[in-house]
Every structure is written in structure tokens, then in C-alpha cells.
């Protein structure tokens, strides 16, 4: 009996070395140019840090920002959900993988009963009862499928690729969180700078208002000049109120992203200069680097899962062979359960052949094929989106330094013009209107410079995300 069961088990394992009906998977060609777009110089930005695959601490160099990011990686709820999705996908893979092996169960029973003796009657008290005992113990496997046509293996491969996709989605959620926290930090630093600029501008305009009042009292200025000066002061005060609200909103955003309170002393350290991120970044020329992005890899894993599902759908057209068997001992006496001659066994193979399913199998195959084609389109779209995001970031990185340099000169020139206008006003050569125009120009120029500095820092974050930097 044991030899028969062993032979059956070996046969099952050997037969389960199945063929796969899933299409052979080949990575599709990337629907983008082979090279990333570069500037007129014919070379991508050459910095001190290779951004592709860079560890986040080498990109986000501000110690206070690093502390906030680390807090977010521990407490952010969206990232926590992504991590739990990986655990769920791993469990599903374990469930489908278990179907590839026979399941064994053990059982034991003992029964004691009394029956009337042969020919007896229940009304005759002289009739004796006979005691009958029954005991058994056995191991059994139920409906183990011989995976001759790869149905179970295809479903297992599908679950495996879905698990890999969940892990890539977790990585993408991590990178997105790091980048979002960094952008929120940069936004806070920018609004702090703009608030300080508005306060400084309001102070300067209040001094101009006092000077205009003195000139007006002395008859050297008219009421129109005074009204314009007063209007400028109130405009700056309105800007102060607006930027105070933006600063508060930026702080609230950081608290939400981190999933935990952020001390005010930490947020007070947010600064735009020096830049909280490394802007001296080197970018590879080949667009193959985009294929390593976690969102692109997740799309490819989903495509591979859909490809494996076609194998399961094709296998449904072929017979399914299942094995059921048991082996053990049975005896009428519990004490003699394991004695010689008490062994029992059973072995029941069965075959299920799909003859008529109402077109369900064919429709299921069409559905699996359509899902594979949808996954292919989404994979190609993910690559195209990655190329677009990288191209946009490169376009900024190749021009932003020149723009900032020009804005710095623009600010300096207009600050000098403002000094001259104020001097001419004191000497009575010009009216307050020229001073007002100069103040507005300087204010706008400084705002533009701050915005450009913010864009440079945010663009470094965009490059980090676009080229798939590493998480923890």
C-alpha cells in the first residue's frame, strides 16, 4: 500500500511539470526616442551627482528637511496603505502557490455502538445486544489537480507579477511622498521669503509715505502723491496678510504629509537659500533609465500578470485531471488499529472535459487578451509620461541658471534706479510717481527672482522623481 501511494505521489509531481500555454513575454519596445532631449550644446546637464537611482538624502541635503521626510516615511497613511497592499499581494501569491502542491489532511475516528442480535425482537428481553466497535486513522488528499496544461502555474505567475507590481507601487508611493514633502518644504520657504519681502517693502513704503507727508506739508508735494503713497502702503499690507495665510497653509500641508506634528522650531528652519536640495545634478543621455522607474516597472509587472492570465484562459479549453486518495488503518478493535492486515487505501483519479460551456471559455480568453492589450497600452503610456516629465525638467534645468543670473542683474539695476528716484524726490527734481514706479518694479523683480529660485529647487525635485531616484 505504501509503495502504491508513493508511486502515486511521484507520478503527480512528475505530471505536474506542465507546459505553459501563456504567450512568451518579451518587453515591448519603448515608444519614445532612444535619447533624452538635450540642449543646443548637445549634452545633458553634467553635475556632481548622478540623479538616476540616487539615494534621497544625497539630493535633499537640508538636515531639517531630512528629519521631516524621515517622519513622513514612518507616519504617512498613503504610504502605509501601499505597504499593506504589498503584504496582501504577497498573501495572495502564497494562496495561489499552494495550489501547485497536494494538500494532506489527517483524520481519526472511533465508534462504539450496540445492535440487536440476529433474528431478535426489541420486545423480547431475552434477546442479547451485540457491541460493535470501529476505529480508523488515515491521511488523505482531496482533488489535487495535475497541472498538465499550466492553468495553476499561470495563475501562480499572475499572482507573483501582481505582487511585484504592488511592491513597485509602494516604491513609487515612497518616491512621490519624498518629493511631495520636499516641494511642500520649498513652498514654505518661498512663502516665508515672500512674506519677509512684503514686510520690508511695506516698511520702505511707510518711510516714503512719511517723506511725502512732509513734502506735502511743506507744499512740495500734492495730495495725489500722498494718496498714491498711502495706496502703496496698503497694497503691501494686503500682501503681508496674503503671504501669512500661505505660510500657515504650507505648514498645515507639511503636518498632513508627515502624518505627525512637526515642531514649529523645525519649520522655522525652512529656507530657500542655500537651496535645501542639491541642484548640481548629472543626467544620463539614454532614455533606458526611464524603464527603471517604479511606476513604469509596476506597469510592466501588470502587463506580465495579464500575459500569464492568458495561459490560464487557454488551459480552460483542455481537460482537467484531479486526484483524490487516502491511506490508513481501519479495525473493529481500537487496540488492534495498527496491527498487520488493518491497512486500507483508496485512489480516485477523475477527468473533467469541457464539452459545452455556452461560449464562456472563449469569452474568458477574449477578456484575458483584451486585459493584456489594456495593460500594454498603460505600460507604453507610463513610459511616454516618464519621458515627458523628464524632458520638461531638463528644459528647465538647461535654462534656469541663466534666467536667475539675468533676474539678479535686473534686481540690482532697479534697486539702483529706486535709489536715484528717491534722491531726486528729496531734491525736488521728480514727483513721487517716479519713486512709486521704481518701488513697484523692484518689488516685482525681487518676487520674480524668488520665484525663479523656487523653480530651480523644485525642478531638482522633479528630476529626482522623473528619473526614479531610490527611496529608503
Image (spheres, rainbow, N blue to C red):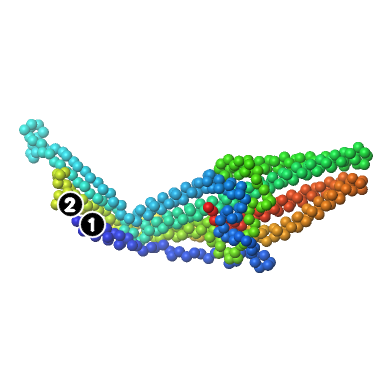
Q: CA distance from mark 2 to mark 1?
A: 12 Å
Q: Quadrant of residue 460?
A: bottom right
Residue lying farthest left?
Answer: 126
Q: Nearer the viewer, residue 50 or 212?
A: 50
Q: Earlier in the sequence, mark 2 or mark 1?
A: 1
Please state the horizontal and vertical placement of residue 374, each as a whole percent of the image.
Answer: 50, 58
Q: Which residue, as the protein is rendered here, is positioned at the far bottom? A: 42
Helix, strand, or loop for circle 2? strand
Residue 386 makes an appearance in the image: no
238 lies left or right of 147 = right
Q: Which mark is residue 5?
A: 1
Which residue is found at the position 52% from the left and 48% from the top?
Answer: 79
Q: Which residue is mark 2?
A: 343
Query: Based on the displayed image, in which of its 4 quarters is residue 211 positioned?
Result: top right
| Image: 268 above or below 369 | above
Q: Nearer the viewer, residue 234 or 203?
A: 203
124 with respect to 464 (left or right): left
Write down the quadrant of residue 405 in the picture: bottom right
Amino acid at each position: 500500500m505504501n509503495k502504491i501511494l508513493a508511486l502515486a505521489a511521484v507520478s503527480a509531481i512528475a505530471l505536474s511539470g506542465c507546459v505553459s500555454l501563456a504567450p512568451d513575454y518579451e518587453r515591448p519596445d519603448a515608444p519614445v526616442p532612444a535619447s533624452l532631449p538635450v540642449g543646443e550644446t548637445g549634452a545633458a546637464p553634467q553635475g556632481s551627482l548622478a540623479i538616476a537611482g540616487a539615494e534621497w538624502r544625497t539630493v535633499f541635503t537640508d538636515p531639517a528637511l531630512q528629519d521631516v521626510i524621515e517622519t513622513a516615511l514612518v507616519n504617512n497613511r498613503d504610504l502605509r496603505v501601499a505597504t499593506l497592499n504589498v503584504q496582501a499581494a504577497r498573501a495572495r501569491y502564497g494562496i495561489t502557490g499552494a495550489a501547485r502542491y497536494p494538500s494532506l489532511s489527517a483524520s481519526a475516528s472511533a465508534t462504539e455502538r450496540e445492535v440487536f442480535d440476529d433474528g431478535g425482537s426489541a420486545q423480547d428481553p431475552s434477546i442479547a445486544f451485540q457491541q460493535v466497535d470501529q476505529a480508523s486513522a488515515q491521511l488523505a488528499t482531496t482533488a489535487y489537480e495535475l497541472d498538465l496544461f499550466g492553468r495553476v502555474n499561470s495563475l501562480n505567475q499572475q499572482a507573483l507579477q501582481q505582487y511585484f507590481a504592488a511592491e513597485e507601487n509602494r516604491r513609487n508611493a515612497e518616491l512621490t511622498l519624498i518629493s511631495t514633502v520636499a516641494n511642500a518644504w520649498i513652498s514654505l520657504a518661498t512663502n516665508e521669503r515672500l512674506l519677509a519681502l512684503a514686510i520690508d517693502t511695506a516698511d520702505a513704503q511707510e518711510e516714503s509715505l512719511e517723506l511725502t507727508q512732509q513734502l506735502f506739508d511743506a507744499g512740495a508735494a500734492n495730495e495725489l502723491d500722498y494718496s498714491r503713497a498711502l495706496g502703496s502702503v496698503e497694497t503691501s499690507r494686503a500682501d503681508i496678510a496674503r503671504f501669512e495665510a500661505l505660510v500657515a497653509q504650507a505648514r498645515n500641508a507639511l503636518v498632513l504629509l508627515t502624518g505627525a506634528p512637526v515642531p514649529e522650531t523645525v519649520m522655522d528652519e525652512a529656507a530657500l537659500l542655500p537651496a535645501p536640495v542639491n541642484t548640481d545634478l548629472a543626467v544620463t543621455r539614454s532614455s533606458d533609465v526611464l524603464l527603471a522607474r517604479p511606476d513604469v516597472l509596476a506597469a510592466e509587472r501588470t502587463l506580465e500578470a495579464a500575459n500569464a492570465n492568458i495561459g490560464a484562459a487557454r488551459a480552460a479549453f483542455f481537460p482537467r485531471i484531479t486526484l483524490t486518495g487516502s491511506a490508513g488503518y481501519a479495525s473493529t478493535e481500537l487496540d488492534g488499529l495498527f496491527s498487520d492486515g488493518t491497512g486500507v487505501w483508496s485512489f480516485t483519479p477523475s477527468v473533467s472535459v469541457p464539452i459545452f460551456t455556452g461560449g464562456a471559455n472563449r469569452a474568458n480568453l477574449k477578456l484575458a487578451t483584451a486585459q493584456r492589450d489594456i495593460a500594454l497600452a498603460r505600460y507604453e503610456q507610463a513610459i511616454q509620461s516618464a519621458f515627458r516629465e523628464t524632458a520638461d525638467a531638463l528644459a528647465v534645468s538647461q535654462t534656469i541658471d541663466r534666467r536667475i543670473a539675468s533676474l539678479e542683474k535686473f534686481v540690482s539695476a532697479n534697486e539702483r534706479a529706486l535709489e536715484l528716484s528717491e534722491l531726486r524726490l528729496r531734491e525736488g527734481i521728480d514727483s513721487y510717481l517716479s519713486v512709486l514706479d521704481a518701488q513697484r518694479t523692484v518689488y516685482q523683480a525681487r518676487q520674480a527672482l524668488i520665484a525663479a529660485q523656487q523653480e530651480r529647487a523644485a525642478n531638482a525635485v522633479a528630476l529626482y522623481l522623473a528619473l526614479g531616484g531610490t527611496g529608503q
